[in-house]
């Protein structure tokens, strides 16, 4: 192999490596930006549900917003981004725990779509489902077979994995 060929291979490899690493950084920055925007939408929704909201944030990013009656908790690990509706823009689902005093009363799933370049809350569902994943417009969730006030609510074998799609403003179960 001559020096010219070696330099060409080295140059192409180096440029590819730099471009790949930059793209990765841009992806991480883009995901961080999306998460920040989605959290802002979720916080606005929660604050509108309360009379005198007060916000606190823990060191690990858990956001708690409450007043004397209710408290909402937004956990970063319960924010799922991906495609939900029919366009090619990244959307999100945010799970929010709702407490009355020390007891969790329900969970809400906030469906936030990217429309016209900004994130908009399109649906808030009261459901104790636990989102597992959001991939290829399919929302996979763990769903309780019993209501929260039933003694079997916390029974680990009394939950089932269900797949949903967002269609015409509703979550529709798919097989």
Image (cartoon, rainbow, N blue to C red):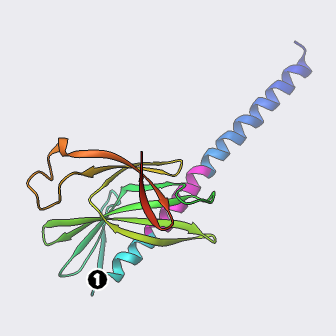
Q: Could you tell me which residue is drawn at 38 percent across and 70 percent down?
A: 124
Q: Residues within 10 Å of mark 1 (few under 14, many from 20)?
A: some
Q: Is residue 38 magenta?
A: yes
Is 22 located above or below residue 100 in the figure? above
Total residue callouts: 1
Is residue 28 left or right of 53 when viewed as pictured?
right
Q: Residue at x 44, y 54 (%)?
A: 80
Task: Point out the residue furthest to the bottom here.
Answer: 51
Q: Looking at the picture, does residue 135 appear above or below residue 102?
A: above
Along the line of sight, which residue is nearer the eye, 9 or 120? 120
SS state under label 1: loop
Q: Answer with the quarter of the image where residue 98 lies.
A: bottom left
Relative to the observer, which residue lies in front, 39 or 83? 83
Magenta segment's dominant SS is helix
Q: Is residue 58 left or right of residue 15?
A: left
- Point out the image quarter for the C terminus: top left
Q: Going 27% across and 70% down the picture, which residue do you hit? A: 72
């Amino acid at each position: 192999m001559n020096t010219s060929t070696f330099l060409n291979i080295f140059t192409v490899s180096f440029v590819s490596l730099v471009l790949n690493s930059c793209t990765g950084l841009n992806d991480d920055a883009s995901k961080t930006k999306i998460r920040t925007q989605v959290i802002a939408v979720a916080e606005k929704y929660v604050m509108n549900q309360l009379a005198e909201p007060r916000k606190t944030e823990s060191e690990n990013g858990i956001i708690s917003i409450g007043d004397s009656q209710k408290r909402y908790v937004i956990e970063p690990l319960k924010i799922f981004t991906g495609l939900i509706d029919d366009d090619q823009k990244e959307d999100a689902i945010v799970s929010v725990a709702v407490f009355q005093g020390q007891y969790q009363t329900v969970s809400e799933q906030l469906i936030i779509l990217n429309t016209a370049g900004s994130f908009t809350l399109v649906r808030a569902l009261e459901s104790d489902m636990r989102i597992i994943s959001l991939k290829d417009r399919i929302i996979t969730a763990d769903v309780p077979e019993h209501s929260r006030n039933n003694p079997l609510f916390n029974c680990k074998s009394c939950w089932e994995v269900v797949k949903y799609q967002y269609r015409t403003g509703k979550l529709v179960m798919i097989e």
